[in-house]
Amino acid sequence: MSRQPAPSEHPGGTTAVVGDRVLTVPNLISFVRLAGVPLFLYLFLVARADVVAVLVLAIGGTSDWVDGWIARRLQQVSRLGELLDPLADRLYILATLLAFTAREVVPWQFTAALLARELLLLVSLGVLRRYGYGPPPVHYMGKTATFLLLAAFPVLLLADAAPGTAPVAGAIGWGLAWWGLVLYWVAGAMYVVQAGRLVRARRAGAVA
């Protein structure tokens, strides 16, 4: 059974033309973002170079928005890019959470809440593949949640690395982090609902 891409709603009702190109500017940015994950882990856990680690996280979070904007602006949206972008997002979030938990920058309960959402999405993806569908395109709610989380992490790290900034940076960082967590779960629920609709439609078609 061939896998079909799950349909998605785009902000503003627009649909981008998806191509098969590999060497595009947005894809190169995504590859650089992927390379930044092990670099961040080394700087934060091994070298303990927290200031440089903050810069790596900040660049990774900013480039998350930049590569999407460039893809639409230059009409370089590609199937590979649609896979690389959310992969880089998830790796940044998971790597940062695990590293922050190891150094007690964030409590394990916060990490567990985000990991539980990832597990829910993983189960949903498994169900979609069983019925011949590929992963659903990233929803704007998920992108907003990812942006908030990737913005929160450098600020939380700054608050931990520079205690003098903690009163302000900590408040801003945790405000962004908790909003990101809530929207992350909202986006997860939307993916589950979307997957349920696709599965019901496939079952109805099979019965007919």
Image (tube, rainbow, N blue to C red):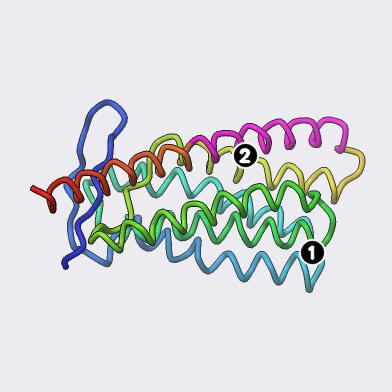
Residue 144: horizontal and vertical position, in percent?
A: 49, 36
Q: Is residue 123 magenta?
A: no
Look at 66% across and 47% down and name the residue there. 113
Name the amino acid, label 1: Ala
Residue 181: numbered disc: 2
Look at 59% across and 65% down and name the residue there. 37
Q: Does label 1 or label 2 sit earlier along the sequence?
A: 1
Q: In this view, does 22 lie to the left or right of 32?
A: left
> Tag 2, which secondary structure?
helix
Q: Is residue 147 left or right of residue 58?
A: left
> Tag 1, which secondary structure?
loop
Residue under label 1: 49
What secondary structure characterizes most of the magenta part?
helix
On screen, residue 43 above or below 58: below
| Residue furthest front as drawn | 207
The stretch of residues the image draws in magenta is 166-186
Residue 65: horizontal and vertical position, in percent?
A: 45, 43
